[in-house]
Every structure is written in C-alpha cells, then in structure tokens.
Image (cartoon, grey):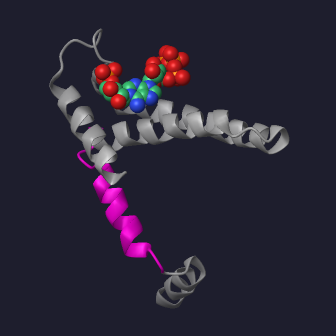
C-alpha cells in the first residue's frame, strides 16, 4: 500500500513540470497555487464529514470511502506542492505507532 502512495507521490511531483493544465488536473492545481489546493482540502474534509454522518444513518460506507480518498488525494497534492510527501507522513505515523495517544499527551503537558 505504501508502494501505491509512493507511485502517486512520483506522479504528483512530475505534474509540477507539466505546463499544460488542460491535460492534467494535478498540474492545474499546482499552477493555481497553494490557496486553491487548501480550498480543495477543506472542501473534501467537509464532504468526508457529511458522508460519514450519512454512512452512520444508512449503513452504507461507499460514499464515505470515496470522499476520504478525495481528501487523502488532495492532501497529497498539498504535501507535494510544499516539497513533502506521503512517505514523510507514514514515517511520522510509524514513529507514533504503539505510543498511546493519552501517554503522549501527558508527556507533552509535563514538558510544557
Ligand atoms: N487520485 C486522483 C484523484 N482523485 C480525485 N481526483 C479529481 O479531483 C477533482 C476534484 O474533485 P471534485 O469532486 O471537487 O470535482 P469538481 O467539482 O469537478 O472540482 P472543482 O471544479 O471544484 O475543481 C475531480 O476532477 C477528480 O477527478 C483525482 N485526480 C487525479 N488523481 C490521481 O492523480 C493522477 C494524476 O492526475 P492528472 O494530473 O489529472 O493526470 C491520476 O492518474 C490519479 O492517480
């Protein structure tokens, strides 16, 4: 699965050199710039929340899964636009793996 994210990262990166925004959605986002990309991330986050509420009442997860894919994808475009990638996020999740969220929070408040 991480291989798929890596492949998608490479495609997103290559779209920075694609001049024809008519041919590529990702190139069009890179060209419009960070504000447009962030607008899409916010829009997809809202759509994911609404789809999750619908999934709870209908018992059908399909739309929620599709909206989450849109959110992940646009977040990956954001990372790529700023010179980061999904592997950086996976590394951070790996670092946190097995570390209880409550323990981590308690350690943070002791530090502060
Ligand atoms: N995974 C995706 C992906 N997911 C969603 N989308 C596009 O995201 C767009 C925005 O979704 P919306 O539901 O908001 O659609 P919309 O209302 O038409 O969008 P706006 O007019 O508001 O911009 C749609 O056009 C979707 O097709 C994606 N576009 C591309 N990819 C991947 O990125 C690769 C490169 O894409 P291109 O750069 O277009 O070749 C593709 O091969 C795919 O692997």
Relative vertical location of residue 72 with respect to residue 27 in this rendering, above or below = below
Q: Which residue appears at 33% of the width and 51% of the height?
A: 86
Q: Is 31 or 80 nearer to us in this picture?
A: 80
Q: Is residue 97 magenta?
A: yes
Residue 72 is situated, as x and y percent measured from the top left of the image, at: 46, 42
Q: Which residue appears at 43% of the width and 74% of the height?
A: 96
Asked which quadrant contains residue 12, the reply is top left
Asked which quadrant contains residue 26, the reply is top left
Q: Which residue appears at 69% of the width and 40% of the height?
A: 61
Q: Is residue 41 magenta?
A: no
Residue 32 seen by the camera: no
Q: How many marks?
A: 0
Residue 39 seen by the camera: yes
Asked which quadrant contains residue 8, the reply is top left
Q: Which residue appears at 22% of the width and 12% of the height?
A: 20
The majority secondary structure of the magenta stretch comes to helix
Q: Residue furthest bottom?
A: 110
Residue 75 is situated, as x and y percent measured from the top left of the image, at: 42, 42
Q: Residue furthest top?
A: 22
Task: Judge from the rendering whether residue 111 lies leftward or rightward of residue 3; answer left or right.
Answer: right
Residue 58 is situated, as x and y percent measured from the top left of the image, at: 82, 37
Q: Quadrant of ligand 1?
A: top left
Please report the bounds of the magenta region as a residue range.
81-98
Relative vertical location of residue 24 with respect to residue 100 in this rendering, above or below = above
């Amino acid at each position: 699965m991480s291989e798929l994210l890596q492949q998608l990262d490479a495609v997103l990166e290559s779209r920075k050199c694609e001049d024809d925004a008519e041919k590529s959605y990702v190139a069009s986002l890179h060209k419009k710039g960070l504000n447009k990309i962030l607008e899409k991330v916010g829009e997809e986050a809202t759509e994911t929340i609404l789809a999750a509420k619908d999934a709870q009442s209908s018992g059908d997860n399909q739309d929620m899964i599709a909206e989450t894919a849109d959110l992940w994808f646009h977040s990956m475009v954001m990372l790529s636009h700023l010179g980061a990638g999904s592997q950086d996020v996976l590394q951070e999740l790996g670092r946190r793996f097995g570390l209880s969220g409550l323990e981590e929070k308690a350690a943070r408040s002791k530090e502060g």
